[in-house]
Image (cartoon, helix red, strand yellow):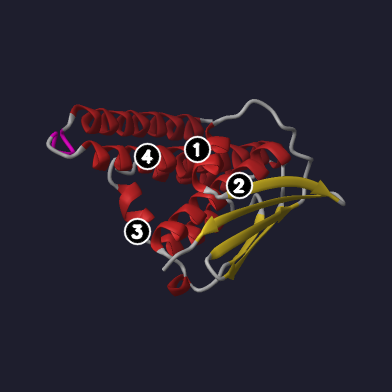
Amino acid sequence: MLLAFNSYKVIKEQRNEVIASLERHLSGEKYSGSLSAGRKSARNADIAQYLHGEVQAGLTASSLLLQQAAKSGDSDLANEALERAAGLLSQDHTNISYTRMAKPEVKLQKIIAGWKGIADISISLPPSVQLEETALRNTVALIEEAIANSIRHAHATQIQVSGILKEDLLTINIISNGDSMVKGKAGLGTKLFNDLASEWNYASESGHNRLTFVLVNKL
């Protein structure tokens, strides 16, 4: 109990550091106020996607692992979950989104590793050299969102992601097990798909969920 209390205290302190870092960014300490409106808007969009994707997904994964540990009494699993959360919250979130967004392939591996112990995830995409940079980044952002939603809302434990490139169109299929996804009020996830994908659709078939989205890929 004492270990858990101390761990939660550390996480709370690190969370405060993250908030302070974001406040410094908003006040202009991190970036010059002379930046053009377009560049500011693009950076804000990147931060929004990063916070919604990796931070929310990472903390959700830690929460689910803690729930598993509580049911099984596995103290090692509980410590792993707390370490994941502490590591995530101790990062400089005003800068890290750009460095990670610059390496989508690494990001995909981090997504798989982030849900380890909760869901088995496989991702197979065309070689990155065949993909335009923006298309690849948007693909990774949407895959991350889809995986997080599959686990949080459908309680998926098996997720397969595959991509097919035909001429200048990249089609991504994400098949997962779990409950059927109930359409509700549109949130940031829906906005991401509406904004980044040329088209997308969801269907529940034969006990599996299938999400398909298409992006334009022009090298």
Magenta region, mostly helix, strand or loop? loop
In the rendered view, would you say 147 is above or below 55?
below
Q: Are marks 2 and 1 in contact (CB under 8 Å)?
A: no
Residue 47 lies, in percent from the top left, at: 36, 40
- Gap in angstroms between the C-alphas marked 4 and 2: 18 Å
Q: Which residue is mark 2?
A: 146
Q: Secondary structure at mark 3?
A: loop
- Gap in angstroms between the C-alphas marked 3 and 1: 20 Å
**Image point 15% across, 34% down: which residue?**
29
Q: Which residue is mark 1?
A: 56
Span colored in magenta:
29-33
Image mark for residue 45: 4
Q: Earlier in the sequence, mark 3 or mark 1?
A: 1
Select label 2 or label 1 by which is in front. Answer: 2
**Image point 67% across, 44% down: which residue?**
150
Q: Are marks 3 and 4 in contact (CB under 8 Å)?
A: no
Q: Determine whether, in the image, residue 3 is placed left or right of residue 89.
A: right
| Type of amino acid under label 3 | Ala
Q: Earlier in the sequence, mark 2 or mark 1?
A: 1
- Gap in angstroms between the C-alphas marked 4 and 1: 16 Å
Q: Which residue is mark 3?
A: 102
Q: Earlier in the sequence, mark 4 or mark 2?
A: 4
The quadrant of the picture occupied by the N terminus is top right
Q: Is residue 30 magenta?
A: yes
**Image point 57% across, 68% down: which residue?**
125
| Type of amino acid under label 2 | Ala
Q: Are marks 3 and 1 in contact (CB under 8 Å)?
A: no
Q: Secondary structure at mark 2?
A: helix
